[in-house]
Amino acid sequence: MPNKSNTYTEQNQVVYAEKITEILKELPPFVSEYFNAIEFSRQPRTQLAYAWDIRNFFRYLVTELPAMNGMDMKDVTLEQFGSVTAQQIESFLRHERVYRNDQAELVSNGDRALKRKLCSIRALFAYLYRMDKITSNPAVKVQVPKIHDKAIIRMDPNEVAEFLDNVESGDHLTKQQLVFHNKLKSRDLALLTLMLGTGIRVSECAGLDVKDVDLDNDRIRIIRKGGAESFVYFGDEVRDALLPYLDQRKALKAAEPDKDALFLSQKGTRLGVRSIEYMVKKYAQTVTTVKHITPHKLRSTYGTNLYQETHDIYLVADVLGHKDVNTTRRHYADQAEENRRNARNKVHLRRSSDSSDN
């Protein structure tokens, strides 16, 4: 169990580690060796995603491949695993596109999910091949699913204004939603204004503690994806939304281990990622039914607004916590194109005929 004194990020890492340990008990020892090797080079959440994908792959092997059919996953040998072919990996990916799980529920995976699964399998094969535990690496022969870029969805300025107005007023909420609105609107307005005014990730928002809010410097302390600590500054509108909630928060009793959490649920527990996603969806539906607005779209909205105001892609990358500016550039390429279009007449090669000489 996570230590009650640990931070939100540390608690999550412990949970991830426990889940990985349970999964590895089902798999051969050589898979555990691989996870030992990547323990300090991959974040626990990433390792957990790898573990899920690799377990699904082994389930497929012992279910569908004649040579391993009926075996316990943990009894698969290195020799058997090393005999897997590229065609069999491709068959697994085809199987994963649409299948029924143990509860007979239909599960489907798009190209992005299949690419992630292949990357997980490739990483395991690459490690075993590099360590001379297998004689070939069939995974490198499997073509990576082609990912088609999606249109960047963001909220327009008028939609942002209406969105926050509805959070404050409760307009267009259902009767059931209005029952709790007066009690929760200060929290909801503070949280959503903070996300729209800083571009922080939903996990970063969920992980905030009261002590992370620095009103003297108008900034918050967050733990970035990857575990790095960072300070993000906010403007007057965010400050004005935070102050009433911070006053209200002093009177709220929080349950252990969430006594320091900034944003609390009605039960006094830390407001989690899923709850924040539901909150965004609830209020977004009062503004638009065409756009699928998620917490990440609030982040995209902030990034777009910041880029339009500054035209500084490096500043946007830094504020959003992107390690690679090319990630930022891909997301805001259309904005850069618009800026180039607007700049086409900014430089004059010859003076107009009516301009005066110096």
Image: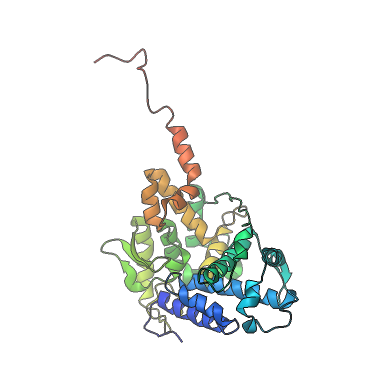
Q: Is residue 213 left or right of residue 330?
A: left
From the top left corner, tell me how far across and down residue 146 is, in percent. 62, 53
Q: What sort of colour scheme is used for the picture?
A: rainbow
Q: Report the residue that reaches farthest toward the left.
A: 358
Front-most of 325 and 56? 56
Residue 104 appearing in the image: no
- In this rendering, the answer to whether 155 lies above or below 338 is below
- In this rendering, the answer to whether 242 lies above or below 17 is above
From the top left corner, tell me how far across and down residue 233 is, in percent. 33, 58
From the top left corner, tell me how far across and down residue 86 is, in percent. 67, 64
> For residue 76, what is the image quadrant?
bottom right
From the top left corner, tell me how far across and down residue 224 is, in percent. 40, 65
Which residue shows up at 37% across the image and 44% down it? 310
Q: Quadrant of the C terminus?
A: top left
Which residue shows up at 54% across the image and 70% down it? 274
Q: Report the residue that reaches farthest toward the bottom.
A: 1
* Total residue callouts: 0
Which residue shows up at 39% across the image and 28% down it? 346
Which residue shows up at 59% across the image and 81% down it? 28
Front-most of 199 and 134? 134
Q: Is residue 69 left or right of residue 295?
A: right
Residue 125 appearing in the image: yes
Front-most of 158 and 357? 357
Front-most of 239 and 30? 30
